[in-house]
Amino acid sequence: MNRTRITTLALLSLSVGFIMSSCGPGGPPRSDYLTGIGGAVRQDTSSGAGHPAPAIPDDVSYWDGDSATGSPVIRINRSQQKAFFYKGGVLVGISRISSGNEDHGTPPGKYKILQKDQAHLSSIYGVFKDKKTGMMINDNVDIRTDKIPPGAVFYNAPMPNFMRFTGGIGMHTGYLPGYAASHGCIRMPHHMSTHFFENVQVGTPVIVE
């Protein structure tokens, strides 16, 4: 099997606490808070526009499924922090992931893809920015518990290539710190979430171990 391995040097010059993973349906227009320093949108191969590169080099993720045939199945291994993509029972891709943390675990079980949304926004997590200046006030907001300060506006966290498989939990592009750190969702490098997104349909089985 010809495996294309993409290694990304650790690059963590941006604050990353705002990359949240537990997801909900839709929300206000996409914010610009994931743009890079000076407002220039970053286009990291591993993480997508505006998403910081992984905290550790990704020498695990690869995709070799474009020419493969057969029914897709995704297996997520939380202990290994990896997602495995099969077509017709043959492994065609592996993605490094970050699953739910101790307080917001990713529940094990057998699921199916319920929804695909390429430009998904969280309805729960995001940031507060000053309405006049655009300056960041709080980059780690849970709108259910955090009150919007006077003069501030809430921006929903973008979660590209969202693939919901149970409740508010799904797979999507997100920051990978090297350990389980999300609010339940499965974060992936952008190039891998794109491959997964393009090769699943509503009803594709997802097994979380």
Image (cartoon, rainbow, N blue to C red):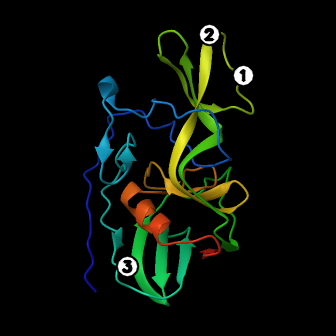
Query: Residue at coordinates 36% horizontally, 67% vertically from top-left?
Result: 61
Find residue 65 and name its label.
3
* Residue annotated with mark 1: 147
Relative to 137, does residue 78 appear above or below in the rendering? below
Closest to the observer: 202 or 48?
A: 202
Find residue 98 and name its label.
none
Q: Which of the 4 image quadrants contains residue 42?
A: top left
Which amino acid type is shown beneath numbered disc 3?
Gly
* Residue annotated with mark 2: 151
- Between the residue at mark 3 and the residue at mark 2, the CA separation in whole angstroms equals 49 Å
- Residue 159 location, x and y as percent? 53, 47
- Between the residue at mark 3 and the residue at mark 1, the CA separation in whole angstroms equals 45 Å
Which quarter of the image is occupied by the C terminus? bottom right
Relative to 75, does residue 48 appear above or below in the rendering? above
Which amino acid type is shown beneath numbered disc 1?
Lys
> Pointer 2: residues within 10 angstroms few (<14), some, or many (20+)?
few
Question: Which mark is nearer the camera, 3 or 1?
Answer: 3
Question: Which mark is nearer the camera, 1 or 2?
Answer: 2
Which amino acid type is shown beneath numbered disc 2?
Gly
Query: Residue at coordinates 41% horizontally, 73% vertically from top-left?
Result: 94
* Contact? badges 3 and 2 (CB < 8 Å): no
Q: Is residue 199 left or right of residue 47?
A: right
Q: Is residue 202 left or right of residue 196?
A: right
- Residue 51 location, x and y as percent? 40, 43
Provide the secondary structure element on which disc 3 rests. loop
Provide the secondary structure element on which disc 2 rests. loop
Query: Residue at coordinates 57% horizontally, 71% vertically from top-left?
Result: 201
- Residue 121 location, x and y as percent? 58, 43
- Between the residue at mark 1 and the residue at mark 2, the CA separation in whole angstroms equals 12 Å
Disc nearer the start of the sequence (3/2)? 3
